[in-house]
Image (spheres, helix red, strand yellow):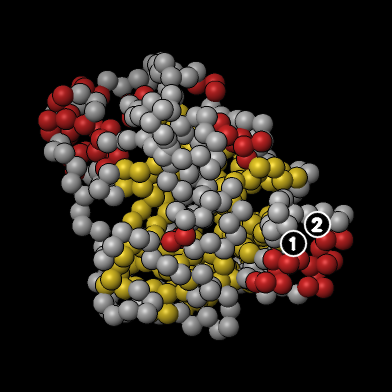
Amino acid sequence: MDDTVDWSNLPVELWPLIGEKLKVRIDSLRFRSVCHSWRSCLPRFHPSPPPKFPLPLSDGPTSFLSQNTVYLLQTPSTSSLAPPSCGGWLVKVEECDRMILRNPITSRRIRYSNDSSSPECFNLLEFRMIELGKSYFLRYIQGSGSVVGLKKVILLPPEIVDCAILVMSDKGNLGFARSGDEKLTRFSNGGFVFDDVIVFKGQPYVVDSLGCVFRIDVSSEAMVKISSKVVGFGGRKHLVESCGELYVVDRYFDQEQNKQQGTGVESDFSRFVLWRGGRHQRYQSGEPKVVDFMVYKLELLDGELGRWVEVKSLGDRAFFLAVDCCFSVLAQDLAGYKGNCIYFSNENNVNLALREVTRPESFVFNLEDHSIQKLGSSPGGSQIFWPPPIELGSTCSYSLD
């Protein structure tokens, strides 16, 4: 049975009703690209003014919210670009006065030199676009730079509170603000240092450096502990949602990195190195780097604190630990297919404002044998990003307008 729908046969009165629901520029572009009739019923996209928020040490709203969206691009069977069997690509798009392509892991802007043989633009109708996640950051109203000192920004669901954000500083403090607020409200952390914050099943959650997860009640400015700590001594915890489950990915550094950051107890880390068979290494130039990861899944218990269950394999999934968000992908949907892996940047604690001035590299960690490879040298690794192929760290430019 053919399930193909001829969208041109939809009742004419439905076209503008559908178009009114499109709040994102890229969706509006795709809608207007279908045919002349659809284009004529929806005016050119004009974004609403971005919401404004206060900064930790300022009075009044002195920054505005910007958004990145991570997409999985797939070629439909009718496309001439590539056969569907080749898999798809990841792309991160920032929407401002125009759309900007960014590296999905490092968030560095992608620019290509004028002599590049790659196309300067692509037709959105050539791809099936699946949204994988959104990330947010603050920019100064006066000037174009990103706000310094922030590690993570999330937009709270409107069902909880309208147009409000949670911000995490690079020191592990947590703050809250509504659009237009004069000051940022800081949560009392009780001495905890927070590593990551996420919206999971419509509710905000935060994880501290020990792996304890708290649900955030914005209305009462309280945090409810829902899990025990992770049984591990990694230097930084990441929250990842995958298939409706909540995971903590524990990132381990070499000894020098743990000493500098004051994360964990050195004797505990020494036991970790021995347990891992002495896999204590640096990638280059003697710089402290990531040496391992551990993955845990949260099991919630009625009336008790949830417990963490170590995950030995991600199966056919791949986790991505980007500088501004974490997400999970079915690896077979990607070109350069590689499941049971974690993709990450070697910039371990860089705040969002420094992504344009640092030159981080990306790596892939294999959970089966705990090996780490630079992404460009991993088989098929450089094929998973759009535009394919792309060497990480190169600078190029594409227009999506």
Q: Is residue 401 left or right of residue 195?
A: left
Instruction: Choose between 203 and 102: the one closer to the eye.
Output: 102
- Give the quarter of the image for residue 155: bottom left
- Give the quarter of the image for residue 85: top right
- Picture coordinates of residue 260, whole percent (x, y): 67, 72
The residue sitting at 41% across, 34% down in the picture is 113
Mark 2 crowdedness (10 Å alpha carbons): few <14, some 14-19, many ≥20: some
Instruction: Choose between 156 and 400: the one closer to the eye.
Output: 400
The residue sitting at 24% across, 28% down in the picture is 33
- Picture coordinates of residue 252, whole percent (x, y): 71, 60
Q: Amino acid at mark 1?
A: Asp
- Give the quarter of the image for residue 341: top right
Q: Can you identify the residue that label 1 sits on? A: 254
Quarter of the rendering occupied by the C terminus: top left
Quarter of the rendering occupied by the N terminus: top left
Q: Is residue 256 visible?
A: yes
- Picture coordinates of residue 345, whole percent (x, y): 59, 51
Q: Is residue 48 above or below residue 188?
A: above
Label 1 sits on a secondary structure element that is loop
Q: Is residue 203 above or below residue 78?
A: below
Label 2 sits on a secondary structure element that is loop
Q: Can you identify the residue that label 2 sits on? A: 280
Whether label 1 touches label 2, CB < 8 Å: yes
Mark 1 crowdedness (10 Å alpha carbons): few <14, some 14-19, many ≥20: many
Q: Earlier in the sequence, mark 1 or mark 2?
A: 1
The residue sitting at 20% across, 39% down in the picture is 19
Q: Is residue 161 left or right of residue 365?
A: left
Question: What is the CA distance from the residue labelled 1 to the residue labelled 2?
Answer: 6 Å
